[in-house]
Amino acid sequence: MTRKHVIVALAAAALATAAGAASAADKIKIGFLPGVVDPFYQVMQIGVEKAAKELGIEVVTQVPPTWGVEAQTPILNAMVARGDLNYIITAPTDKEQMVAPLQAALDAGIKVITVDTFLGDGDYVNGPVKFPISYIGSDNVEGGRISARGLAKAIGGKGKVYINSTNPNVSSVEGREQGFKEVMAKEYPDIKVIGPDYNLDDQNKATQQTAAVIEQNADLAGVFGTNVFSAQGAGAAVVNAGLGGKVQVVAYDATLAAIESLNKGDVSLVLAQKPFDMGYMAVQFAAADAAGVTSLPKRVQTGFAIIDKDNVKDPNYSRFIYKAQ
Amino acid sequence: MADTAKIRFEAAGPGGKWGRGREILFRLSRLWAWVFLGLMIAFFVVAVPVYNGGSVNFLTVRNSQNILVAITPVLLLGLGQTFVIISAGIDLSVGWVMSLASVVSALAVRAAFNAGVPLFWSVVISFLAAVAAAGIVGFFNGVIIAKLKVPAFIVTLGMSFIVRGLGLLWSENTTVIGLPPGIRAYGNEALFYFIRGEGGGFYFFAPPEISGDMLRRMDRILPYPVVITAVVVAIAMFILRKTQFGRHTYAIGGNVEAALRAGIPVDRRIIQIYMLSAVTAGIGGFVSTLRYTAGSAVIGDPLLLSSIAAVIIGGVSLFGGAGTITGTVIGALIIAVLTTGLVMLNVDAFWQFIVVGAVVIIAVLIDQSRDLIIGRRKPGRA
C-alpha cells in the first residue's frame, strides 16, 4: 500500500470508529419476529444480523415454530414484556388478526416495521392501518403477474393451470394469487386457472393437493406454487407423477430445493425475492428512526430476480438463491 | 373429592414401617406439578435479569398478565378436556371446535351489528352462537360414543375432520374480517389499569385518555379474556367438586361397570361430558375472535396437543378416575411460563417443546408409579 492509501485507510477507520461510538451512545435494541422457520426468513435473518453488527445494535430473534397468530402472538407479547426493546421488525402472519397485538406493542412504546407481509392493506399513509414505520417487501402482485406470464409462455399460451398457496388472508401470497389471476384473465383467455388450494404452510399437504389435481385433470399443463413450501410440495407431486418437465412449474421463492428442481428440468421458472434486502433495510430504518430521521418512506419495494435454466449459473442471478452465506 | 386414587391409597392401609415414607411420597406425587412450576418461576426470576444484564425482569406486572392471557386458549380447551379424560375418554375434536366457534361467532357478530343490533348485544349473540354451535357438535360426539358404543378416540377424531370442513366452508376459506371496530376493546381491554411512576395510579374499568409516555407506562391488569377464563374455571371447579355430575364423572372414569350398577345414568352423563368439553372449546373460539378481531378456521389446530399436555401435566390420569381442575390450570401455566421465560432468555422457543414433552412423560411415569407407592398387595397377604 502506498502512503496515500494508508492515510485514506486510517481516515476511513477513524470515521467508522466515530460512527460506531456515536451509535453506541444511543444504543437501541430490536426484536426480530419473522413468520416461521423457512429458508426465506433465514436469509432475511442474515440481512438483519449483518446490519445490526455493522451498526452495533443488539437484536433479539425468535422464530415461531408454525405459521399462525396463535404461535406468533405469545412470542410477540413476551418480547414486549421484556421492556427493553425499542423496535420490532416482524412479518405479521395475518393482516387483520395481528393488528390488535401489534397495536398493543406500539402502546407499550415499541415501534413496528413490517417486512414481507403487511397489516391492513399495506398503505401506511392512507390505509386503515397507519402505525407501522414502513412496509418493506416485494410487490407481490407484480410477482404474481411475472409468474403468470412466465408460466403462460412455458405452456404455449393455453391449457389448464393450478395455483397452490399457503394461507388465506396473508398479504404476500394473496397478492401473488391476485396478480397471477389478473394476468391470466386479461392476457391469456385460453388458459383456465384452477384453485387456489391452501396447504397452510405444510409442504406435505401441498404435495397431496397437487397430486389430487393432477389425478383429476389429465390435461393439466402448469402449476404455480406461491411460496417456499407450496412450490416445493407442488413440484414434488409433479415429479412423483412422472410428469417432471411435461407439466410446467413456476416456483415462487428460490430455495435450494427449487433450484435443484430447476436444474433437473422439473421447474421452469423460479422467482427470487430479496429477503436479505428486507432484513438489512429494516434494521437501518430502525437506526435512522432512532437517530431522528422523519422522512423514511412508508413503502419500500424490494425487487425480484427471475431465474430460469439460462441464467441460473450467472452469479448476478445465482446470488439471490436462498442459502446460508 | 371423589378421587379413586386417594380411595385406593387409603384402602391399602398403613403398610407397616414404610407407611410414613410412602405417605409422604404419595402426597409429593400429587404436588409435584406445583413444585415444578415454582422451581421454574424461581429459575426465570433469577436467570432473566442475569442474562440480560439487569435490563429485563421476569416477574413484572405486565409479564404476569401476559402469561395469564397466554394460558387462556390452552386452558379453555383443557377445562372440558379435564372432565373427558377423568371419565376415561378423550376429545380430539376440541381444537377444530374452537376454530368453528371462532368462525361462527365472527359471522354472527358481523351479521348482527350490520343489521343494526347495538354492539354489546351483538357480542352476546356472538357468544350464544359460538356456544350453541359447539354444543351441537359435543352432543353428536356424546351420542355416538354413548349409544353406538364407538370408542371416543375414533369418534372425536372423525368429528374433528367434519368440524374442520364446516369451519373452512363457512369462512369461505379465509379469515372472517370486517367485524365492528369496537370488538377489539372487548378482546384486549381490561378490568384495571395501572400507570407506573409519575402521575400514575389505579384505574377501574375504563382507561384514561392518555398518550405518549404515560401510555407506555400503563399496564393492563386482568384483561377481559382472563376474566372470562377465570369465570369458566370457577364454574368448572364447582361442577367437578360439588355436584353430582362431577362425582359421576369420577365414577365413570374409575369403573364404568360399577357406575352402571350403582345406578348412575352413564349414557346421559357421557353425552353431557362431551357437550361440556365442546362448549368450553366454543368459549375459547369466541374469546379468540374478540382478541384478534377476526374469525379464523385454523386457529385451534395447534392448541389441541398443548391442551392435552396441560391436562396430563396437571395430574389427570389417562386411565381415568383422578384429577382436578387446579391441576389443569397448573399444567397450562407451566407451558406458558416456559415459553415466555425462554423468549426473555433469548433462547429458541423450540426448547419449550422438548421440555414440555419431557414433563408430560414424567407426569405419566409418576401417575403409573402411584400404584407402586400405594403398594398393590398380592392375594393371600394380610
Image (tube, rainbow, N blue to C red):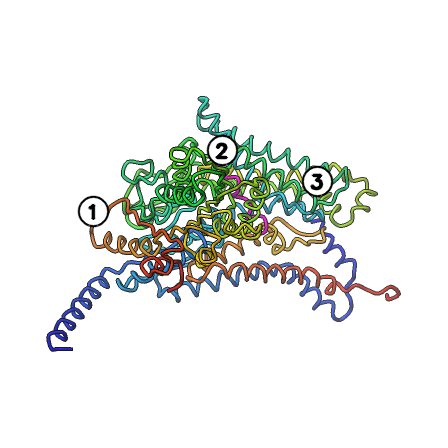
The total number of labels drawn is: 3
- Disc 3 crowd, CA 10 A, few/some/many (<14, 14-19, 20+): some
Give, as a three-letter code, the residue at label 3.
Answer: Phe
* Viewer can see residue A91: yes
* Disc 1 and disc 3 on one polypeptide chain: no
Q: Nearer the viewer, residue B202 or B5?
A: B5
- The residue carrying mark 2 is B106
Residue span colored magenta: B295-305
Q: Residue furthest left?
A: A4
In this picture, residue B49 sits left or right of residue B366:
left
Give, as a three-letter code, the residue at label 1.
Answer: Ser
Cβ atoms at labels 2 and 3 below 8 Å apart = no
Magenta stretch holds residue B160: no
Q: Chain of mark 1?
A: A
- The residue carrying mark 3 is B245
The label shown at residue A295 is 1
Place residue B48 in its image quadrant: bottom left
In this picture, residue A209 sits left or right of residue A129:
right
